[in-house]
Image (spheres, rainbow, N blue to C red):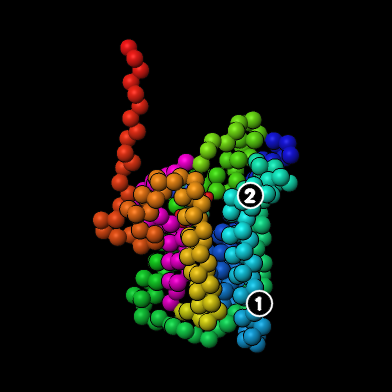
Amino acid sequence: MGGIASVLYGAVVYSLFFVTFLYAIAFTGNLALVPKTIDSGTEGPLIPALVINTLLLGLFAIQHSVMARPAFKRWWTRFVPKAVERTTYVLLASLALVALFVHWRPILAPVWTVTNPLGVVVLQAIFWFGWFLVLLSTFLINHFELFGLRQVWARLRGHTLPEPQFRTPFIYKRVRHPIYLGFLLAFWATPSMTAGHLLFAVATTGYILIGIWLEERDLIDLFGDQYRRYRQQVSMLIPWPGRKAKPEPEISHPRPAE
Ligand SMILES: C[S@@+](CC[C@H](N)C(=O)[O-])C[C@H]1O[C@@H](n2cnc3c(N)ncnc32)[C@H](O)[C@@H]1O
């Protein structure tokens, strides 16, 4: 694929991702700005709703976990050019989310309902903080590389991509997975939890915990002892006093002979 075509493909997919990301906020937060949310629409029979919602969540989880693994990437970059591998991953992830938004069936039995005005405000604040944390953390780790734009831009400029760098900026010094923490806050913090929303929150929490286990295996393969030390020092999801990344020991280089 030529450099300009790669950049165009990357830009279109990035736009699709961004719209999907905004829609996900409205979908999980039941914001009336969008035509369909997690609890909108007419409720149908329970069993088909459970089956369809579980299949939709499973489709997203399988797409995400399988395609993110290094062995899969090595295999499919024999067919998909390396420069657009990440873009194609983002495209398929966004399409899996669109399918979930379109086909999701509401299950409206209430699980909890908070009516206390302060409680409602606190839960809504946690919801918005969660989404803010997700977006902020993508920028801390490398937003444009995560969503494929850096790769297609490098292809256009004829540059090779640098090797992945281990990073612990800002909140990454306190928790190893702030993006996933943000999702958990956003998915659980609601004043009115329905059975459908609970299914979504429980399934995504399970998926995130499995995803962390898989991601950390890959990170240890990639960064070795550096990541092992980080894991010993820093909490997985919940920041804890005293649990903080320590500066890496300086590597001493022999002084050149004078
Ligand atoms: C969707 S991001 C999630 C990052 C992290 N798990 C989080 O929740 O903030 C997944 C990508 O981030 C990379 N990654 C995770 N932690 C990293 C770190 N400390 N430094 C560099 N890359 C990291 C992984 O290799 C993977 O490609």
92 w.r.t. 54: above or below:
above
In magenta stretch: residue 178: yes
On-image quarter of the C terminus: top left
Q: List x then y, in percent, for residue 125.
A: 39, 66
Nearest to the observer: residue 9 or residue 240: 240
Q: Is residue 136 left or right of residue 255?
A: right
Q: Which residue is mark 2?
A: 73
Secondary structure type for disc 2? helix
Kindly identify the residue that appears in the image at 43 percent across and 77 percent down: 191
Disc 2 crowd rating (10 Å Cα; few below 14, some 14-19, many 20+) is some
Report the magenta residues as a range.
Answer: 165-191
Label 1: which residue? 52
| Sequence-wise first label, 2 or 1 | 1
Can residue 251 be seen in the rendering of this structure? yes
Give how far apart the Cα atoms at labels 2 and 1 are: 29 Å
Q: Nearer the viewer, mark 2 or mark 1?
A: 2
Quadrant assignment for the N terminus? top right
- The quarter of the displayed image where residue 149 is located: top right
Residue at 44% across, 46% down = 224
Q: Amino acid at mark 2?
A: Lys
- Asked whether, in this view, residue 236 is left or right of residue 161, the answer is left
